[in-house]
């Protein structure tokens, strides 16, 4: 109960901060010129580093790729659990807890996904989505180096995620939870693997977008904002061919 109260206090504080600091309309640009420059930098890194790694990753055996994807997705479920509580979504809380428990044990630390076969399909939730479910607007849109597109609400949520995510608690903060602990390297290794897995799944989509977009920056902005809106509404459109655009 004490942990839940702390989570509620954290989100309440963040909500007040957003209400006070972000009076701009949803999706309005913040310093677009700077964002475009950062976007160009990110795309250069993608072309030089991430895309070649993703294409090499796609050459791995199917079971290896699927196991990696299952493992990172299972760990991301930990962040969904406190956010399900904050949103009061009991049904999804059951899916999240049940899925993590089954996949972490029967599923061999999450490399297998038996939970899905019995109908457990947890939505991936984060603090940004929780704030959105409270009716908090996104605030202005901008691009971060490496991390990519975001909004005022989602960037604050990104910071808050490291406080409410049990996996971040035992890695970044190096605290022990239920006899388990890790370090910063563990956290960023998993996040990096998740990023590569996503990029590998969308090689063709990225190439198509780069080839057909008149303004690639605007195209990514539109896709990101629509994706976040769908996730806040728990829309079935979450499961489109682009997967999770917030990696």
Image: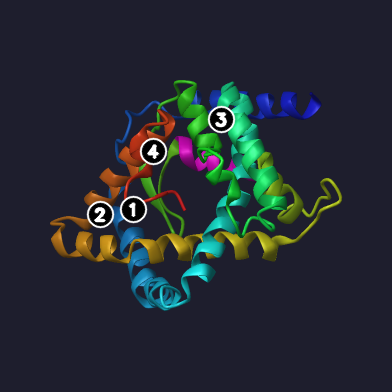
Residue 2: percent from the left, percent from the top? 80, 26
First-in-chain label (2 vs 1): 1
Q: Which residues are magenta?
A: 153-162
Q: Name the quadrant of the N terminus.
A: top right
| SS at mark 2 in the image | helix
Closest to the camera, between mark 4 and mark 2, is: 4
The residue that label 3 is drawn on is 92
Secondary structure at numbered mark 1: helix
Marks 2/1 in contact by CB < 8 Å: the verdict is: yes
Q: Which residue does the numbered mark 2 point to in the structure image? A: 217
Crowding at dot 1, Cα within 10 Å, few <14 / some 14-19 / many 20+, comes out as: many
Q: Is residue 157 magenta?
A: yes
Most extreme residue toward the right, as rendered? 179
When asked about the image quadrant of residue 184, the answer is bottom right
Task: Give the spatial CA distance, label 2 vs label 3.
Answer: 34 Å
Task: Find the distance from the CA under tag 4 to the CA under tag 2.
Answer: 17 Å
Question: Which residue is found at the position 59% from the left and 34% from the top?
Answer: 95
The image position of residue 91, as x and y in percent, is 57, 25
**Mark 1–mark 3 CB contact (< 8 Å):** no
- Report which residue position mark 1 lands on: 35
Within 10 Å of disc 3 (Cα), the crowding (few <14, some 14-19, many 20+) is many
Residue sitting farthest toward the front: 118
Which numbered dot is residue 228? Answer: 4
């Amino acid at each position: 109960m004490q942990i839940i109260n702390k989570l509620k206090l954290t989100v309440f504080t963040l909500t007040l901060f957003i209400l006070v600091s972000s009076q701009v309309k949803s999706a309005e640009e913040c310093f677009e010129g700077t964002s475009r420059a950062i976007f160009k930098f990110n795309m250069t890194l993608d072309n030089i580093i991430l895309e070649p790694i993703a294409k090499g990753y796609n050459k791995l055996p199917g079971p290896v790729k699927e196991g990696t994807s299952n493992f990172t997705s299972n760990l991301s479920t930990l962040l969904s659990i406190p956010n399900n509580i904050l949103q009061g979504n009991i049904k999804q809380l059951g899916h999240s807890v049940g899925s993590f428990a089954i996949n972490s044990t029967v599923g061999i630390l999450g490399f297998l996904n038996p939970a899905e076969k019995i109908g457990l399909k947890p939505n991936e939730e984060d603090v940004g989505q929780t704030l959105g479910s409270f009716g908090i607007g996104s605030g202005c849109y901008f691009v971060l180096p490496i991390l990519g597109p975001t909004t005022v609400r989602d960037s604050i949520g990104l910071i808050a995620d490291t406080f409410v995510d049990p996996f971040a608690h035992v890695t970044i903060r190096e605290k022990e939870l239920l006899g388990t602990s890790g370090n910063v390297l563990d956290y960023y290794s998993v996040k990096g693997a998740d990023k590569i897995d996503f990029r590998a799944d969308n090689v063709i989509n990225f190439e198509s977008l780069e080839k057909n977009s008149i303004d690639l920056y605007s195209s990514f902005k539109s896709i990101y904002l629509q994706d976040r809106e769908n996730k806040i509404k728990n829309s079935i459109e979450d499961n489109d061919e682009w997967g999770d655009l917030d990696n």
